[in-house]
Amino acid sequence: MKKHLYYLILGTLFGIILLKSEVVSWFRINEMFQFESFHMFGIIGSAVVCLAIAIAMIKKVGAKTVKGKPIKVKAKSGGWKPLIIGGTLFGLGWAITGACPGPMFVLLGKGVYSIGVVILFAMFGTFVFGLLKPHLPK
Amino acid sequence: MNLIFETWPWYVSGPLIAFIAVALLYGGKVFGFSSNFRHMCSALGAGKVSDFFDYNWKENSWNLVFLVGTILGGFIGHYFLGQTDSIPLNPTTADRLVELGIGAYGFVPDSIFGMEALFSVKGFLILAVGGFLVGFGTRYAGGCTSGHAISGLANLQWRSLLAVIGFFIGGLISTHFILPLLF
């Protein structure tokens, strides 16, 4: 339970950050894809730079997890087709709904209840992907 | 106190998101949100019809707890940390959206998320198809903004860069060609 409380607190902080920086606003995503605001690029860019520095330091000093195991950021393997095709399909949906997966749930908490439809169909989309996976380009 | 109630600037939010990712690494987890859709399918019994969902989803319960936290965060942010019901958009973007008929007022556009839109065939289909694409695409690509654009790029994975290029191909097509057709 204590372990779960840690992730609940982190999730809550994440939700607050996404709401207060307006990442969960459809308008901010539209503005980003119009290249008419630095806001989203600044958020994603600075998060990447800060995390890259942190990961480089973790690797250098061999930092350990709370359980004393070495921290690993595992890279997945595979071809380029799923990344480009899957990435493009996600991008199409992202710009229409203005929400990537995390923000969908933040909006639900904010009281934008119609996002529930988006969440249910995202689950359905993942389900259909699972069924079709053996037949899709690898 | 205005600092808390107004829009948080990018140079505050970006590093804070990196902090969340590091805190997850400290717990032995990698920041990646979209796999929760897979875990939810698995929890609902999808493992019976597809091997893709046949695994012990409970091992990833931390991520579902994290998800519950994001809902809570949305609630707390909305009710206790100030209403942000008008987004300080670039006026060029705002004018274009008004002209398109999407509108530029509110936190999210009423023309897409309002009850009138939700209960119209077209409005419902926009939400449903959009959601479907996000769920299908993220799993096919193996991650979303958090997993690929943030964790992956920060870990200098070229595969994540390909995924992010895909995100932008799709996002630009929707923003510049599909949305203007729909509205």
Image: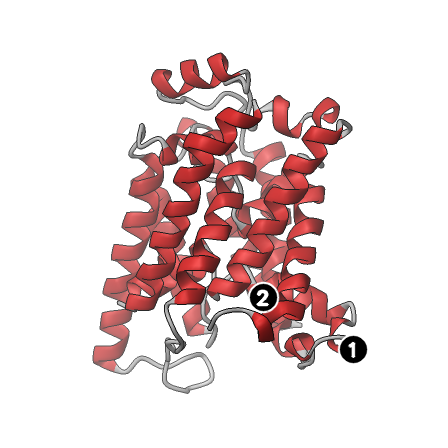
Q: Quadrant of residue B128?
A: top right
Secondary structure at badge 1 equals helix
Position in image of residue B130 (x %, y %): 59, 43
Q: Quadrant of residue B94?
A: top left
Q: Quadrant of residue A41?
A: top left
Judging from the image, mark 2 belongs to the subunit labelled B
Residue A78 higher or lower than A124, as above or below = below
Position in image of residue A25 (x %, y %): 51, 34
The tag on residue B63 is: 2
Badge 2 density bin: few <14, some 14–19, many ≥20, Cα 10 Å: many
- Looking at this view, name the residue that lies furthest to the bottom: A69
Q: Nearer the viewer, residue B146 or A124?
A: A124
Judging from the image, mark 1 belongs to the subunit labelled B
Q: Nearer the viewer, residue B128 or B3?
A: B128
Position in image of residue B84 (x %, y %): 52, 26
Report the residue at 48% width, 39% height from top: A95
The answer to whether residue A22 shows anywhere in this view is no
Position in image of residue A107 (x %, y %): 61, 40
Badge 1 density bin: few <14, some 14–19, many ≥20, Cα 10 Å: few
Sequence-first tag of 1 and 2: 1
Secondary structure at badge 2 equals helix
Report the residue at 26% width, 63% height from top: A52
- Disc 1 marks which amino acid? Lys
- Looking at this view, name the residue that lies furthest to the left: A60
Q: CA distance from mark 1 to mark 2?
A: 22 Å
**In the image: residue B46, left or right of residue B112:** right
Task: Read off the residue under disc 1.
Answer: B48
